[in-house]
Image (cartoon, rainbow, N blue to C red):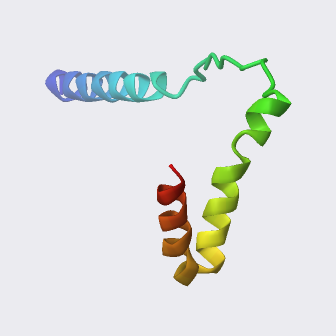
Amino acid sequence: MDNFFNSYKFIFLLLAVIIFVSLSGCGTKTIVVQEDSKAPTTLETIGKMEGIVFALGCMFAPEQCSDIVNKKENKE
């Protein structure tokens, strides 16, 4: 009878350890985020306008996209 209770104590202790270990990973973790406080300047945003126009032009008129690329290569 004494051996019977000892085996239950061991099983109870083992389950308690398993539960404790599994719950220890559930804590909240602090994430440090670095914010870029520098806002883009007007020159940086307008300078990308040609690429944006080219992408939109090729998206809405794909048949003319190769003509635009050829003209751009001939210009350079």
- Quadrant location, the N terminus: top left
Which residue appears at 54% of the width and 64% of the height? 71
Image spot of residue 68 (x, y percent): 56, 68
Q: State the residue lying farthest toward the bottom.
A: 63
Image spot of residue 24 (x, y percent): 47, 21
Which residue appears at 63% of the width and 61% of the height? 54
Residue 9 appears left or right of 54: left
Image spot of residue 34 (x, y percent): 66, 17
Residue 12 appears left or right of 32: left
Which residue appears at 78% of the width and 28% of the height? 40
- Nearer-the-camera pick, 35 or 56: 56
How many labels were placed on the picture? 0
Res. 62 image quadrant:
bottom right
Residue 76 appears left or right of 34: left
Q: State the residue lying farthest toward the front.
A: 75
Q: Work out whether 50 lies above or below 38.
A: below
Q: Work out whether 63 lies above or below 47.
A: below
Which residue appears at 61% of the width and 73% of the height? 59
Q: Work out whether 56 lies above or below 22.
A: below
Q: State the residue lying farthest toward the left.
A: 3
- Nearer-the-camera pick, 15 or 75: 75
Image spot of residue 69 (x, y percent): 50, 64
